[in-house]
Amino acid sequence: MSNWWREVILIPGKLPLLVCLAAFVTTYLLVRVLTRLIRSGRGSLRNAVTAEGLHVHHAVPGLGLLISGAIMALVPLDPGLILVSAALIGSGSSLVLDEFADILHLDDVYWTQQGRTSAHVVGLAVVCLLALLVGLNPLGVDALDDTEFTVRWSGSVLVAVTTAAVLVCAAKGKYRTALVGVFLPPVAVIGAIRLARPGSWWAGRYPQARTDRARERAARFDHRYVRRFHHVLDRVTGGPEPPGAEGEDMRPGQ
């Protein structure tokens, strides 16, 4: 175990990244537990606002932690403070991304259908951090032997193909596939080949018959996979308010 820790984490210099990931996930889980308790009326910070009615979202302290950690990372630090910086960045990023939907819509949509966007972004961020942690670096090309020229040219072609596939996925409205495909090129290539999502820029160029096929495929996919994904997601993050329900008074304060 000690050899694995030294060879996989310490020698490649991935300990700060591991600390960042751990802080990110831990902070997100703690915040979601707290907000769900507040939502159910069992939290000690229910309706925690100032006398002027100002609601301070937890993205605000998150920005403070994120900026502090980023500034610390720009100056020479000893190893201990580098880990502190990584923890600040992880925790701050988690707090900010947990309210990504609110920032995107410039509205309090935390417990609505639109609020699920925050959980999606958090999940993608965790996937990216895990990919970097296990060594799936989209910009890394290692070659130290006599075949360096061939390897680097092959790597350049791979990067070019992956970039093109990722851009096509984004144009087809497959944003999650595009992001994961940055680290796993086959995912991007498969996503680029398959039909576009309805409503995307790419689908707008389809003839009517192909548009109908895209809608049918998207409907089948969403029914089979997205519905189950949302069920699991809601168990972790708390489901959105039912349509027409008034959840404003249950919005957590920090």
Image: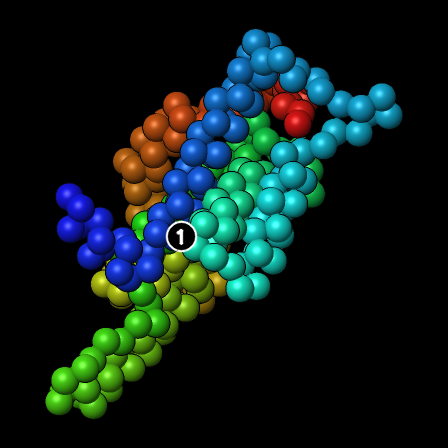
In the rendered image, the residue lying farthest to the right is 52
Q: Quadrant of residue 235?
A: top left
Q: If the image is split into quadrants, where does the C terminus sit?
A: top right
Question: Residue sitting at 35 percent across and 37 percent down?
Answer: 226
Q: Nearer the viewer, residue 211 or 36?
A: 36
Q: Is residue 52 at least partly visible in the picture?
A: yes
Question: Residue sitting at 27 percent across and 53 percent down?
Answer: 9
- Give the left or right position of residue 172, taking residue 71 as reference: left
SS label for mark 1: helix
In the rendered image, the residue lying farthest to the left is 146
The residue that mark 1 highlights is 16
Q: Amino acid at mark 1?
A: Pro
Q: Nearer the viewer, residue 66 or 57?
A: 66
Q: Nearer the viewer, residue 36 or 203?
A: 36
In the rendered image, the residue lying farthest to the front is 78
Q: Quadrant of residue 191?
A: bottom left
Residue 183 pos. (x, y %): 31, 61
- Give the left or right position of residue 140, taking residue 203 as reference: left
Q: Tell me, what colour scheme is on the image? A: rainbow
Q: Is residue 209 at least partly visible in the picture?
A: no
Q: If the image is split into quadrants, where does the N terminus sit?
A: top left
Q: Quadrant of residue 71?
A: bottom right
Question: Residue sitting at 57 percent across and 56 percent down?
Answer: 72
Residue 139 pos. (x, y %): 34, 72
Residue 14 pos. (x, y %): 33, 56
Residue 59 pos. (x, y %): 63, 39
Question: Residue sitting at 48 percent across and 34 percent down?
Answer: 27
- Give the left or right position of residue 170, taking residue 66 as reference: left
- Up-down: is 158 above or below 182? below
